[in-house]
Every structure is written in C-alpha cells, then in structure tokens.
C-alpha cells in the first residue's frame, strides 16, 4: 500500500505554487520529481565524499570509489543482472542506445535487417538510421494498430535470418503501451537476432528482470525514476559487451597505453571513458533504494488505480479522445479534445498550475500514424492523487469553455 | 495611428482585466479578428519555425506600408499574432524596424517572450522585422 500523505511529504517540490496555484505535476513521463532522500544523497556526496574515483590512493578517493561501485551492485541486484560488470553507467538512455548502435556497425553488412517498432521515441530511431546508412543494412518498422499495440503477427513474418537486431521500447513514451517484450525477445532469438530494449518509460513503474527476460541489452535513465538527470545505465550480457568495441576513448577505459598500442580495460570500465558522473551514479543507487522501499508492486497498483480513475473521468468530457488504449499500459494518457490544439490546452492548464506535456513527444511517427499534430499527455506517478485528477478534469472543462 | 499609439491602446485595453482568465479570453477574441492569410500562401515557406503550433505569416507592400496576414492552428497563438499584426500591419517598414516590443510585458504576456517558449512569439517578431528590413531595402 502507498501511504500517499507520507509519500507526498518526501517530495519538497510538491509544496510549491505555480502561477499562484498549488503545483499539480502530471509530466512524470518527461522526468520524475526527486524525494528528499535522494536530494540528501546528493548533498551527502558533495559534503563528505567528493573525489575522483578508481585512481586515487587517498582515503576520499577510495571511499567515493566504494560508493560508486556499491551503486553498481545495487543496480545489478535491482535488474537482476548476472554480473555487476554487465552494468555500464551512461549519461542516460540515449547514450546507451548510441553506444550499442555504434558497436554494431562492425557486425552489420548489406542485406542485414534492423527491426524497430513503430512507437519509438526519436532517440531510438535516429541512431539506427545512422547505423543503417553506415553499414548498408536496412531499417524495417514493426507496425502498430489503432489501439497502440504492436502487430505481433506482422512482426513474426518480418523475422528472418537477415534480422540482426531488434529494437523497441518496453513502454511507449507517447502512448503508455507496455510491449510484450518477453515474447518479442524469444522470437528474435529464434532467428539469431540480438535485442535492445529501451526501458526509460518502464523502469519508473516496473522492475525488469534482465535474466528472466533473456534480453541482450537494456537501457534506462535515472531521472525518470526519482534520480538525477545526466545518468543512466546500459545492461548488456557479458558475451555481448566483450564483443562490442569501446565507444569513446579516454581515461578510465584503458589498461595499458603506449604509442604503438592500447589495451582496453576490462568490463565495465571499457565503456566508461573519462571521469564519470560519480555523484549521479551513487545517487541513482539511492533513487532505486527509495523506489524499492516503496515496492514496485505497490507503485504499479496505485498508479493503475490513478490511470483507471483518470481515464473514466476524462472520457466524460465531450469530444475528448484518448490515443493509446492498449490493454497493458502504464499511467500515461495521451489525448486531444476535438477542435482544440493541444498547445492551447497546455497553456491554459499551466495558468492553473498543472504541468502536462503537449506536442509530438519526440515521437513524430506516432502522431503521423494518427494524423494529428500532437497530443496533450498527462502522466501520473505514485505521488499523484485522485484529488489532483479531479482538479485536472475541472481545469480541462474550463479550458474547453475558453477555447471553443 | 503610429505603432506607439496602437501599443498604448493595447496597454489600456489589457489594463481593464483583473486576472489571467480575462486577459486570455480577450486575446482569444482578438485571434478571431486576425486578417487571415490567403490560402495560396499557406505553404511550408510561410511557416514560422520555433512554434509548437503552426503559424503562417505573409507580407505585402502597399503604398510604402507593410500589410501582414497570418493564421495559426492554435487559438492562443492566433491571439498573439493578431496583437502583433494590429501593431505592425499598415506601418512603414522603417517604423517597424525601429519599434520596440516592451508593450508585451506591459499587457501581462511577458511569459510568452522567453526565447524557449514553444509558441515562438520571439520568432514571430523576428519574422515581422525581417519582412520590414527586406521591404526597406526595396524602398531605398
């Protein structure tokens, strides 16, 4: 059970006013808010442990290194990776995707195929387009239906021995659809393709078990799960990470350097060139601790309750249409009201202290699919309430009155 | 009327409102008075970049004065561009180039002036001034 009063007290920003109204933060799919426990972890790091890691002989450097590596262990446990060196710290999801895409450029040839789902975020399309341009492989799109679910029978037909890579998000950022990833991974493996899953939108709601999923690569960002921006992780199976070449050269990632030859460091350091976001990595661990203390089953049950409540309330507004009605979805509602531009709705809601996202959500192909310029997206987190949803619905009715 | 006089009028009109709702309602109503762009100009090259909603802007020079027409698919954006057109349309290019836009702050719409704001008010003003500069060059 989520004790909502207690949970809300953990988030200082929720006490803030915006445009003279109490903040209602429904833009959680863009970034989540930060609990006091995580803020304190940042303060603690800079107050007590700030030093560069993995190289100093002095106590401070050793303590910072220990904390950073402890965070890696925490993340290993959280995602149930077999080894801690399968957890690579990155600057975020996009970095992780680019690291893998870049690494695969040596493995792909003309005639090979890369499959990507129709509901991808831009960051998950562009690196593959660039990869295909470099290698002559072709990019194929797994279509989706009007509900916002992938067409699995079409996907099955697209798979062949030419398929080398399959990329898709665990949860769609624009629609909230939870994709059947275990099934997709199994099918892709049958033809020998590797699978990368973008978990940025899933990890705030679901605790993925990478060994059980048998996924080859899984990427996510800390800032969607109560952590800071600028840090994330790439999980990769050991065998894949050993095969992939390093992404960036620099300090930390080398073992020996002479002018003739450099030998790379072992995993995970091979992929962690330069001084990393030390504080970010440590605090990512603190954020995962915070969420685990609440419990992911509790979080997803509570958020599902909010989703059902809000969906019912919103559908009572005449002319309102929800995009993305998959049977399995997270607490994200993308919608439009007939005859009103999403931008206008977002502007009026902002005047009433309500933060939502408007626009194409960096997922232009999805908007083109529905033939709309964009949507209003309300995304709920475990610290939101039904009372906030009531206020939101009232505000929408008021916006509708003003704008039609 | 000069640009400064029209700006004074707008400041007077907006000063009658007590809260944001009335101000926005008035802006939305002003949007309905927007001199609409001719369909033939509603093309990609008339779109102002930097707006989350679409804004089309067209200019013509008549008797040494710049006439603007425009449209947008969002109603608040339409209101904003209507205010700008009321100020700048029918003015001499030189006066448009030399004018300032401090009145936007004074009518309580300062929040729209941030360059990162998705409605692109800054881009609209820039485009209007670009047209004025182009016509001024023609006149010289």
Image (tube, rainbow, N blue to C red):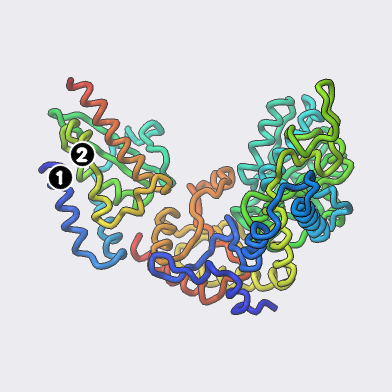
Residue in view at x 81 percent, y 38 percent:
A270
- Quarter occupied by the N terminus of chain A: bottom right
Residue in view at x 74 percent, y 32 percent:
A249
Q: In this orientation, which residue lies closer to the viewer: A318 or B104?
A: B104
Q: Mark 1 lies on which chain?
A: B
Q: In this orientation, which residue lies closer to the viewer: A47 or A154?
A: A47
Say which label, 1 or 2, has the lower sequence index: 1
Disc number at residue B99?
Answer: 2
Residue A168: x %, y % from top left: 71, 46
* Residue A231 placement, left or right of B119: right
Kindly indicate the quadrant of the structure image that contains residue A100.
top right
Q: Is residue A210 above or below residue A143?
A: below
Residue in view at x 83 percent, y 60 percent:
A77
Residue B75 visible in rendering: no
Disc 1 to disc 2: CB gap under 8 Å? yes
Q: Mark 2 lies on which chain?
A: B
Q: What element carries label 2?
A: loop
Q: What element carries label 1?
A: helix
Q: In this orientation, which residue lies closer to the viewer: A108 or A367?
A: A108
* Residue topped by disc 1: B4
Measure the alpha-carbon separation of dots 1 and 2: 8 Å
Q: In this view, does A7 lie above or below A289?
A: below
């Amino acid at each position: 059970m989520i004790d909502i009063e207690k949970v809300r007290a953990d988030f200082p920003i929720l006490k803030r006013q915006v445009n003279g109204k109490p903040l209602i933060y429904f833009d959680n799919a863009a970034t989540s808010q930060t609990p006091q426990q995580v803020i304190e972890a940042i303060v603690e790091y800079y107050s007590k442990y700030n030093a560069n890691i993995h190289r100093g002989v002095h106590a401070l450097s050793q303590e910072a290194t220990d904390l950073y590596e402890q965070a890696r262990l925490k993340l290993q446990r959280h995602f149930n990776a077999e080894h801690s060196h399968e957890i690579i710290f990155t600057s975020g999801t996009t970095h992780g995707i680019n690291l893998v895409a870049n690494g695969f450029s040596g493995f792909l040839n003309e005639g090979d195929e890369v499959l990507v789902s129709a509901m991808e975020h831009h960051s998950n399309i562009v690196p593959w387009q660039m990869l295909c341009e470099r290698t002559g492989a072709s990019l194929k799109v797994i279509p989706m239906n009007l509900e916002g679910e992938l067409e699995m029978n079409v996907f099955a037909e697209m798979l062949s021995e030419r398929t080398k890579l399959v990329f898709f998000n665990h949860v769609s950022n624009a629609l909230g659809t939870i994709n059947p990833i275990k099934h997709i991974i199994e099918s892709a493996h049958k033809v020998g393709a590797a699978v990368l899953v973008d978990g940025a939108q899933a990890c705030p709601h679901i605790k993925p078990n990478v060994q059980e999923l048998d996924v080859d690569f899984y990427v996510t960002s800390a800032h969607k799960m109560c952590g800071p921006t600028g840090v994330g992780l790439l999980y990769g199976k050991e065998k894949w990470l050993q095969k992939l070449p390093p992404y960036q050269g620099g300090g930390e990632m080398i073992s020996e350097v002479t002018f003739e030859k450099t030998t790379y460091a072992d995993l995970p350091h091979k992929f962690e060139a330069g001084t990393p976001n030390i504080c970010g990595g440590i605090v990512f661990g603190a954020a995962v601790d915070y969420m685990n203390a609440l419990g992911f089953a509790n979080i997803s049950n509570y958020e599902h309750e909010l989703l059902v409540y809000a969906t019912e309330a919103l559908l009572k507004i005449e002319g309102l249409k929800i995009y993305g009605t998959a049977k399995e979805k997270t607490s994200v509602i993308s919608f439009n009201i007939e005859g009103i531009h999403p931008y206008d709705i977002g502007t009026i809601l902002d005047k009433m202290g309500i933060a939502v996202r408007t626009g194409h959500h960096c997922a232009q192909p999805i908007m083109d699919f529905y033939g709309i310029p964009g949507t209003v997206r309300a995304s709920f987190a475990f610290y939101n309430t039904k009372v906030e949803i009531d206020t939101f619905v009232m505000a929408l009715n008021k916006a509708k009155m003003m704008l039609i | 009327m000069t640009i400064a006089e029209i700006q004074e009028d707008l400041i007077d009109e907006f000063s009658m409102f007590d809260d944001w709702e009335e101000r926005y309602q008035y802006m939305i109503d002003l949007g309905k008075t927007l001199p609409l762009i001719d369909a033939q100009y509603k093309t990609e090259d008339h779109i102002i970049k930097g707006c989350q909603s679409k804004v089309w802007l067209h200019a013509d020079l008549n008797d040494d004065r710049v006439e603007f027409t425009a449209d947008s698919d969002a109603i608040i954006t339409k209101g904003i561009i209507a205010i700008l057109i009321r100020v700048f349309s029918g003015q001499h290019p030189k006066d448009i180039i030399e004018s300032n836009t401090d009145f936007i702050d004074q009518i309580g719409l300062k929040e729209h002036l941030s360059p990162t704001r998705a409605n692109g008010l800054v881009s609209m003003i820039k485009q209007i001034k670009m047209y004025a500069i182009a016509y001024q060059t023609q006149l010289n």
